[in-house]
């Protein structure tokens, strides 16, 4: 079974992330899964966007100049879905206003829009019908504790919507992912989520949640994950040790596999390679042949798929079955 290709925020190397065109392109490129980051609007609609903020990827400051909070930032949670749909969105800028990936789609151009999670699930459903494919989805619950403090609980709303779209069983082509380990436990044990769950592993200094990501990478941490989840989504850098031009496995993938966990590292970017690699293909080859990952999050789903198929031409994807 070959590793699956997860289109990270869509074909985000080519079109602004989390827009419908980026998802359609990733679909057409043959990604096995399309990723959705999920945040909540003021009127409790689930919206597909990476950040709880709007200012680095949209014209919100021009369209709604008075609607920022005291920290100067504009929050998705402070806007109704109808207002969010009015915004223009574009390629990501950093805090200084420079493009994060300068070679990508030019920012502040085009007529790209936000969309709801419902819109994206409808898109995938109808494309799967018209093309007779079974492309999967890979929703991430963003900042669940923060959202609860803002008066909304995303997880039950997400599960309800997924069920409405017939994602009901562990074998269905969907992974639900989250950085917050308490939320992953809650999804399985309290909310009775039957779907495949992935524990994302970040860095403690990101302050993404109260989860201790150093602990999660220990055997005890992985055992804790394996009790409730089907896989892990570590950083590529967690899976390897680099010294000069020498790269070797860190052992994380192997230890996770011993516990039955699938491993889907993030993020393959041909225009931003990890230390130790000089090409996209060398990185993917290492991940597939040496690390033996089960999937890869990629901003370049076409390139990543091409290289995986070159390495494992006769092999079927590990999932969807
Ligand atoms: Ca994500």
Image: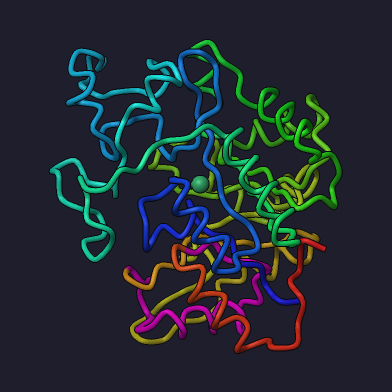
**In the image: residue 166, left or right of residue 57:** right
Which quarter of the picture shows residue 63?
A: top left
Residue occupying the point 55% across, 71% down: 250
Which quadrant would residue 5 be assigned to in this image? bottom right
**Whole-percent x, y for residue 52 in the image:** 40, 30
Which of 177 and 185 lies nearest the eye of the viewer? 177
Could you tell me how many numbered marks the image carries?
0
Quadrant where the C terminus is found in the figure: bottom right
Q: Nearer the viewer, residue 186 or 49?
A: 49
Q: Is residue 218 magenta?
A: no
Residue ranking furthest to the front: 130
Q: Residue at x 50, y 24 (%)?
A: 40
Which quarter shows the N terminus? bottom right
Span highlighted in magenta in the image: 272-298
Residue at the spot x=47%, y=20% of the render? Answer: 41
Tell me which residue sits at (20%, 53%) in the image. Answer: 99
In the rendered image, residue 170, in percent from the top left (x then y), is placed at 84, 47
Q: How is the image coloured?
A: rainbow
70 w.r.t. 225: above or below: above
Q: Between residue 19 and residue 260, name the one nearer to us.
A: 19
Residue 294 position, x and y percent, is 68, 68
Residue 286 in magenta stretch: yes
**Where is residue 46 shown, x and y percent of the image?**
55, 27
| Above or below, 221 relative to 81 | below
Q: Nearer the viewer, residue 249 or 116?
A: 116
């Amino acid at each position: 079974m070959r590793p699956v290709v997860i289109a990270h925020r869509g074909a985000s190397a080519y079109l602004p992330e989390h827009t419908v065109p980026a998802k359609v392109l990733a679909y057409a490129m043959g990604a096995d899964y399309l990723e959705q980051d999920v945040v909540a609007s003021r009127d409790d609609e689930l919206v597909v966007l990476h950040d709880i903020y709007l200012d680095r990827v949209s014209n919100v400051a021009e369209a709604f100049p008075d609607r920022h909070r005291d920290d100067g930032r504009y929050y998705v949670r402070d806007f109704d879905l109808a207002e969010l749909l009015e915004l223009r969105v574009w390629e990501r800028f950093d805090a200084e206003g420079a493009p994060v990936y300068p070679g990508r789609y030019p920012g502040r151009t085009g007529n790209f829009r936000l969309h709801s999670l419902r819109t994206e699930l409808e898109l995938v459903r109808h494309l799967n019908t018209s093309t007779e494919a079974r492309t999967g989805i890979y929703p991430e619950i963003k900042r669940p504790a923060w959202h609860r403090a803002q008066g909304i609980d995303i997880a039950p709303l997400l599960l309800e919507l997924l069920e409405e779209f017939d994602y009901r069983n562990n074998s269905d082509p969907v992974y639900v992912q989250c950085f917050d380990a308490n939320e992953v436990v809650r999804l399985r044990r309290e909310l009775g989520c039957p779907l495949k769950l992935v524990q994302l592993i970040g860095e403690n200094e990101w302050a993404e949640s109260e989860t201790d990501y150093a602990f999660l990478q220990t055997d005890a941490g992985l055992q804790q994950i394996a009790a409730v989840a089907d896989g892990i989504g570590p950083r590529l850098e967690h899976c390897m040790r680099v010294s000069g031009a020498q790269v070797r496995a860190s052992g994380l993938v192997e230890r996770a596999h011993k516990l039955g966990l699938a491993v889907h590292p993030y993020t393959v970017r041909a225009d931003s390679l990890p230390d130790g690699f000089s090409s996209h293909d060398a990185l993917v080859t290492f991940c597939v042949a040496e690390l033996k990952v089960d999937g890869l999050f990629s901003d370049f789903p076409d390139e990543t798929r091409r290289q995986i198929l070159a390495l494992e031409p006769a092999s079927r994807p590990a999932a969807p079955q």
